[in-house]
Amino acid sequence: MFYAFDLSLDSQQGFDQVVNILQTSFLAKFIIWGVVSALLYHLVAGVKHLFMDMGYFEELDSGRSAAIANLIIAAVFIVLAGVWIW
């Protein structure tokens, strides 16, 4: 990941090479999707924790509902990221 970022910033040829790899390689797209999925889940869980810091969803039932909503929202975002990447 860092190598591809470094290569893309090195020169126009390096950027073109990274773009070509990302357009043709299933493995590269899968790795990018995995990283984006982790970031999206982390973002959604972070928003949930911000609400918890404000005093919401601290009881067992509401916390469980928030956790389920967290998983559903993250799953929707992850599927949309997959559609966007492919």
Image (tube, rainbow, N blue to C red):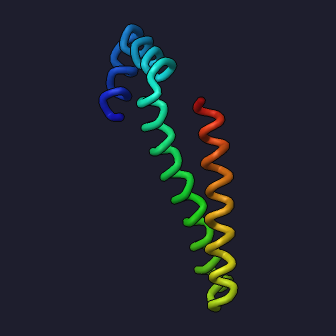
Q: Is 14 situated above or below 6? A: above
Q: Residue at x 36, y 14 (%)?
A: 14
Quadrant where the N terminus is found in the figure = top left
Q: Is 19 situated above or below 1? A: above
Identify which residue, 84 or 52, lies in the foreground. 84
- Residue 39 percent across, percent down from the top left: 50, 51
- Residue 23 percent across, percent down from the top left: 51, 19
Left or right of 14 in this view: 22: right
Left or right of 72 in this view: 21: left
Count the numbered circles shown. 0
Q: Is 83 situated above or below 39? A: above
- Residue 34 percent across, percent down from the top left: 47, 44
Quadrant where the C terminus is found in the figure = top right
Identify which residue, 58 or 31, lies in the foreground. 31
- Residue 52 percent across, percent down from the top left: 61, 80
The furthest residue to the top? 13
Q: Residue at x 68, y 59 (%)?
A: 73
